[in-house]
Each structure stands twice: as C-alpha cells, then as structure tokens.
Amino acid sequence: MSDQPTGKPGVAMMVADDELFALAANWHAAGHDLALAFVISTWGSSPRQIGSLMLVRGDMQIAGSVSGGCVEAAVIDSAQESIKNGRSQRLDFGVADAIAWEVGLSCGGKISILVMAVSEAGFPPHLLTSGVESLAERQTVCFRLPVNGGHAQKSEKVFEASKLEGDEFLFAQAPRPQLIIIGAVHISQHLASMAIQTGFDVTVIDPRRTFATAERFPGIKLVFDWPDIALGDISLDGETSLVALTHDPKIDDTALHQVLGKPLFHIACLGSRRTHAARLERLSEAGFSDADTARIKGPAGLNIGAKTPAEIAVSVLGELVAAYRGRALQ
C-alpha cells in the first residue's frame, strides 16, 4: 500500500498482535504520525477481546483491529484527532446508543476504546522501543494507561491479563505462543503454514536437509540440526508447544528428552497407539516418570477421521489451539 495519504481508511494490515509494537516503532522511526487504539472494556457480543490493539497512521494506514469492522471507522476518525492534538481520548460504543447503529455495532454488545497518540503527552515513543525489546526476549510487556488523560507508563509489575482498573487500563501483551515442529515432513508443511495464520511463532527442526528445505517451507523458520542441539537455543517457556512428527525415535525421542522437564503447555507426538505405547516404554526406561510421559498427547490430533496430510494437520492444530485456550477435550 502506498505511504501517501488517501483521505479514507486504508485496508488493515494482517499483523500478529505481538508484532504491532515493532510495526509502530518502525512507522514512528520513519517519520509517520500515529495513534494506538486499545480495547479497554467489553460486554456481550463484542468481536474483539480486551487488550486488542489497532495502529492508525496520520495517512490512514492501519494495522490490527479493535472490532470485527463495526467501529473501526469511528476509531480512525478519533485517532486522527488525537494525532493532531497529541493526546488521548476514550470512546464508548453500545447498541443502545444512536452512534452504535451508525458505526454498525448492532450485535448487542458494548465496547470501549482508548485512543492514544504516540507523543510525550500520550503514548511516549520510547515505550514502543521498550515493548519491542521485551517481546524479543519473550517477556510480557505491561503498561499503565490513564483513561482520562495523561501519558502511558511502563509497569514493572507483570499483569496476567489486560484489564480496566479504576482510572487506569493495565495493558499486558504476552509474547506470541510458539510452536516447535520436529520433522520437516508433509504434514508439517500444512501445519506450519496454518499455525502461523492462527498466530503462532513456528520453528521446524530437522537434521535431514533433504526434507528441511526453503522450497518446501517458504517463509518458515528452519533449523537444520538435531533437536537436542537446536532446542538449547530456544526459550522453552509456558507459551511453547512441541509437536513431533517424524515417526523416527532417533529424532522424536531426542526432542522429548529436552522438553519433558520444561513448562510447555502442550506436547504431542504423531503415531499409532502401538507406536505411542512403545514410545512411553522407551521414555520410562530412560528414567522419565509416568507423570512426565502423561503430558504427551499421543497419537497427536483430534479424532476427526483425518486421512490426508492437510486433514491431519487440521486435527493437530485443533488440539493445539484447545490446549492453548485451556479447553478440556472429551
């Protein structure tokens, strides 16, 4: 999209939530005026959760979103005002208000948006850089945003989730959940692509260069090494999942040995029930407890009758998303 003003809202760029601060920092460094719009409160059928963020540039370029499209135009207009005066403003939309119908919020919900110009009186520019640095180190970014005027501040206290508390909005942006795929197999090609679109930071590890090629995995992070070496350079935190897909114990088991003692939220391995039983026996013989091995989902994926590599990838991704969202599966 052109950097020239269009006089009307631009098409929203598809950017992962944790990348919005980096994009905002880049835009500001390039000399663009911009404002940040935060969802600070919702009720009922609001299409976006609290903490959702949208960037609005002075030339109408936008990224991210604060609704399903129903209030964006009004938010963009308010953002232009904030950019001009360098301050912040709170916007409240509800289905009972006439403005709600004008902007299209007819779904029965309510939503409040805090718009802050990137300025010393609003959202100070140095906080963008601070946010980028923290996320790069896989640390949660936390800011205190006054909702009735005043400038944002970084919080030393880490909030578990974004929330409105009195006259402040406590904003928390966790690093993007990461998916580590062991094995550059056919299923992995589909899974990696779909997981990225779902919002995961994806890395594929496979020492076999015949499989792990840029042609088979365009735009995907590939690590050509054995899992015990590759995983030593990756932060294995509570926002991490590992799915092993090679069917080769020399590769899959090596990865499992590295992660079973780590706080990953999801570990899964492909293979039949017989294959999984043999896997558990090998891990037991290697000294892992029943509690350790019980964390492994095997066979990986939801039972949806999947047959093709793409269908299997869908089943694996569905199970992964359910685990990330804390949903128990029957």
Image: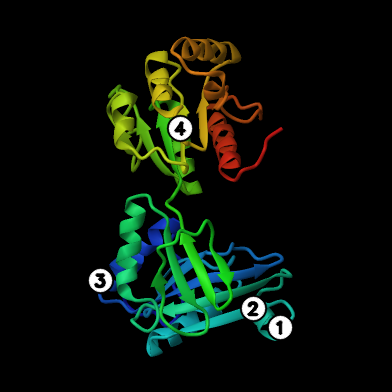
Tag 1, which secondary structure? Answer: loop
What's the distance in space between the residues labelled 2 and 3, CA to CA? 32 Å
The disc at residue 242 is 4
The disc at residue 93 is 2
The disc at residue 97 is 1
The disc at residue 108 is none
The reply, left or right, for residue 104 in relation to residue 91 is right
CB within 8 Å, label 3 to label 4:
no
Q: Residue furthest bottom?
A: 85
What's the distance in space between the residues labelled 4 and 2, CA to CA? 41 Å
Crowd around label 1: few <14 · some 14–19 · many ≥20 (10 Å): few
Q: Nearer the viewer, residue 110 or 307?
A: 110
135 vs 65: above or below: above
What's the distance in space between the residues labelled 3 and 4, CA to CA? 36 Å
Amino acid type, label 1: Asp
25 vs 323: above or below: below
In percent of the image, x 33 and y 38: which residue is there? Answer: 234
Amino acid type, label 4: Leu
Amino acid type, label 3: Ala
Tag 3, which secondary structure? Answer: helix
Query: Which one is earlier in the sequence, the residue at label 1 or at label 3?
Result: 3
Query: Which one is earlier in the sequence, the residue at label 2 or at label 3?
Result: 3
Quarter of the image containing the N terminus? bottom left
Q: Within the image, what quadrant is residue 23 found in?
A: bottom left
